[in-house]
Amino acid sequence: MSNRKISRRWLTRTLIIALLLAVVLIAVVPTAFAHGPQCWGAGCRGKSPQVQGCSHDAVTVAWTSNSHEVVQLRYSPGCHAYWSRTYSKLAPANVLYTRAALKYHVSATRVVNWYSTEAISKMWTGPATACGASVSKAYPGYVPVRCVN
């Protein structure tokens, strides 16, 4: 009989814990994922598309590629803003840095990620040209910049 009481107690405690976890998940998960864009238009300039929630509905509107990198011009309809995303084609161990920026707005949008195979620029509004570069440790003086609009 004592085994039956222990089993019922264990089952009751397990059900209570599961119920509490379900309540916490129901309360937390929607607020974590339901946030829409945190900026719009000119209010997004110079801000991160990931932090502002603009990458959730983003589309690649143009892209180009060479032997070193892929450069994409990204656009978020919800934020009405553009940014550049660059992926290195170099072996990760050979990447000195990867850079992404928007032409003519480089000072406000440029992001350089040292020893990384990806870089995402800050956002800008209006017509945009995405530029990027991936620089090899073996040839740091050779910076193959690609642009697309």
Image: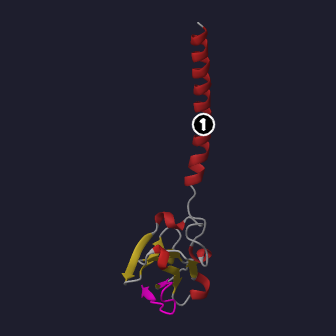
* Residue depicted at 51% across the width and 82% down the height: 126
Q: Quadrant of the N terminus?
A: top right
Q: How would you rate the neighbour count of disc 1 (Cα within 10 Å): few for under 14, some for 14-19, many for 20 or more?
A: few
Classify 45 as above or below 24. below
User: For the residue labelled by badge 1, is the local secondary structure a helix, a strand or a loop?
Assistant: helix
* Residue depicted at 41% across the width and 77% down the height: 89
Q: Position of residue 52 (x, y in %)?
A: 59, 67
Tell me the residue that label 1 is attached to.
21
Residue 108 painted magenta: no
Q: Is residue 2 visible?
A: yes
Q: Which residues are magenta?
A: 132-149
* Residue depicted at 59% across the width and 52% down the height: 32
Q: Is residue 128 visible?
A: no
Q: Quadrant of the C terminus?
A: bottom left
Q: Position of residue 138 (x, y in %)?
A: 48, 86
Say what amino acid the circle numbered 1 marks. Leu
